[in-house]
Amino acid sequence: MYDWLIVGAGFAGSVLAERIANERRQSVLVVDRRPHIAGNAYDRYDDAGVLMHQYGPHIFHTNSDAIVDYLSRFTEWRPYEHRVLARIDDKLVPIPINRTTLNALYDLDLKTDEEADAFLQSRAEPVEEIRTSEDVVVSKVGRELYEKFFRGYTRKQWGLDPSELDKSVTARVPTRTNTDDRYFTDTHQIMPKHGYTRMFERMLAHPNIKIMLDADFRDVRETTAFRRLIYTGPIDEYFEFRFGKLPYRSLRFEHKSLAQETFQPVATVNYPMTEAYTRITEYKHLTGQTSPNTTITYEYPSATGDPYYPVPRPENQELYRRYQALAIAEENVHFVGRLATYRYYNMDQVVGQALAEFRRIQENVPAWTAP
Ligand code: FAD
């Protein structure tokens, strides 16, 4: 009999396993149907000896000191600021759009924020009521930049035209008038020094924690006794798709090792206008690894495959709410993480969600096992 069964060894499941084992001194069985821990953040050394991310590039960034303090128990860090270039026509230009982008694309010499702002305003088209993602971007930067940077990328990424997508998808498109070419502006921009998987190994290294891989909850629940459940898998699957499937957008990753030191000037290059893939990432920029080889990943958006991005449409949120009502009524089960709450969360947000859930557990769930 385990005190807790935790389904999923990603951030949500692993943070809760660590907290329960260390703070409550209770026994935990963590199961994952994949052959490894770390969920989507899983990284590994490939045959070329390069540390790469199996499920696409994962860059850690947060404004929360508390989350960095917590994770620092399990890893050291290396500073890393992510930079992305977009291939537009025959040029590689910074994205998010900034003053350098405008100068490079239009052969301009804009010197100040004000000049860049005036340029964007001269391009922006007034839109009476902003409803769709297209409206958001066109009203901010005009149709030409919209076509170059957003339209094709969004169509590839979501399989939908921006005019069919809710304004929330691009509502916070950062467009800068300065020359800051960092992708993120968070106060902490760091990568685990020895990789994510190593950090997870240290998080889960506790005598109260057992890990079972290649094991599906559906099978384990038949054979294993436990008192309480933490479920970080897809919420619709837990309820056997009673109301239908929650729609997700997926990705197909094509990993390639090359016998050359570097492939591209920054970690990620986006292809908004051409190619079937959305972007290429080269991991050595993220990890700082030196090696005669390099590994890159092409990302092809897809309608089928593993669930990655909840499709942001109001009717899908409505469907999720119906599952959420069932989840609330389910006794002795906690639904945590991106799949169980049908939300796109960054890693730091999932860590924050899991730590908050642990505080609720401490307040509400009696410690039945003697410490
Ligand atoms: P997951 O990591 O998905 O873990 C859930 C685990 O549960 C999985 O391992 C799964 O196998 C297991 N599971 C599910 N159902 C079952 C079952 N029935 N039985 C057994 N096991 C089960 N975030 C950032 O902060 N920065 C980034 O740069 C970033 N890049 C991303 C890039 C891509 C392409 C994607 C898709 C996501 C990215 N994210 C990024 C988000 C990040 O991946 C998530 O925040 C994080 O993985 C969420 O952790 P989780 O534990 O909720 O889910």
Image (tube, rainbow, N blue to C red):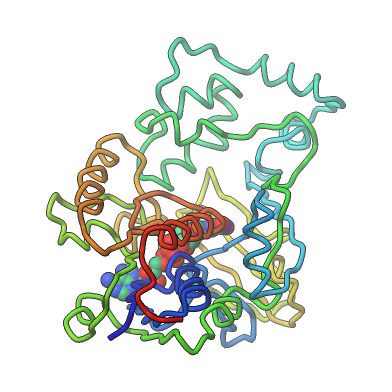
Indicate whether 338 appears above or below 318: below
- What residue lies at 65% left-to-right and 51% top-to-bottom? 64
Specify whether residue 337 is in view. no
Residue 259 location (% of width, % of height): 67, 81
Residue 357 location (% of width, % of height): 43, 58
Which of 240 and 125 lies nearest the eye of the viewer?
Answer: 240
**The furthest residue to the front:** 370
Which of 25 and 356 lies nearest the eye of the viewer?
Answer: 25
Q: Where is the N terminus found, in terms of image quarters?
A: bottom left
Asked whether, in this view, residue 243 is left or right of residue 131, the answer is: left
Q: How many marks?
A: 0
Q: Quadrant of residue 190?
A: bottom right
Indicate whether 150 appears above or below 17: above
Indicate whether 20 appears above or below 113: below
Q: Quadrant of residue 49?
A: bottom right
Which of 80 and 29 lies nearest the eye of the viewer?
Answer: 29
- What residue lies at 53% left-to-right and 23% top-to-bottom? 138
Which of 114 and 357 lies nearest the eye of the viewer?
Answer: 357
- What residue lies at 16% left-to-right and 82% top-to-bottom? 222
Residue 186 location (% of width, % of height): 69, 47
Specify whether residue 215 is in view. yes
**The furthest residue to the left:** 242
Residue 53 location (% of width, % of height): 55, 71
Q: Quadrant of ligand 1?
A: bottom left
Asked whether, in this view, residue 287 is left or right of residue 222, the answer is: right
